[in-house]
Image: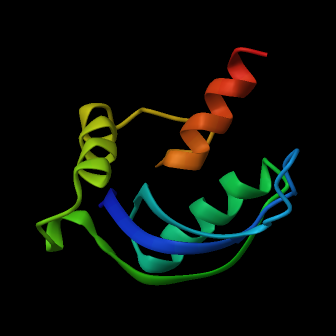
Amino acid sequence: MRELWIAVAEVLTEPSVGNRDTHAFTNVVTWASTSSDYVDSVTAVFAEFGWTVLGTENERPVASETGFSEEITEIIERAAESKSLHLCDVPLLSVQAVLACEKQANG
């Protein structure tokens, strides 16, 4: 059964203008059935932006935990509202992916 999962992803990104930092850690929420399904989904969406997932840690179903930060709670709520929500053709919500997809959609 697919449900919301969360983990921290270590990501290597392309350098942005004025910022040479290419190494990032981010919380990522996505629909998955297993830990490996989670990793596959996260890896696929970040690859769409030319980013590389170097690793993930503490993959777990969202339902197994409480007390998330306000920012993470908002992302979880947005994902839970629609099981068909897709960003960049992969069912994923993350702060970076939301911003990148909105930028891509708006040109």
Left or right relative to 36: residue 82:
left
In this orientation, which residue lies closer to the viewer: 37 or 7?
7
Q: How many marks?
A: 0
In this orientation, which residue lies closer to the viewer: 10 or 82?
10
Q: Residue at x 22, y 50 (%)?
A: 70
Residue at the farthest top position: 106
Q: Position of residue 76 (x, y in %)?
A: 28, 48
Q: Residue at x 16, y 73 (%)?
A: 64
Q: Is residue 46 above or below residue 55?
A: above
Q: Residue at x 78, y 48 (%)?
A: 48
Q: Is residue 88 visible?
A: no
Residue at the farthest left position: 66
Left or right relative to 86: residue 73:
left
Quarter holding residue 14: bottom right
Quarter holding residue 34: bottom left
Q: Is residue 45 above or below residue 80?
A: below
In this orientation, which residue lies closer to the viewer: 66 or 25?
25
Q: Is residue 76 above or below residue 43?
A: above
Q: Residue at x 79, y 48 (%)?
A: 49
Assign the C terminus to one quadrant of the image: top right
Which color mode does the image show? rainbow
Left or right relative to 26: residue 52:
right
Q: Is residue 77 visible?
A: yes
Q: Is residue 58 above or below residue 83?
A: below
Assign the N terminus to one quadrant of the image: bottom left
Left or right relative to 24: residue 52:
right
Q: Position of residue 31 (x, y in %)?
A: 40, 54
Q: Position of residue 20 (x, y in %)?
A: 86, 62
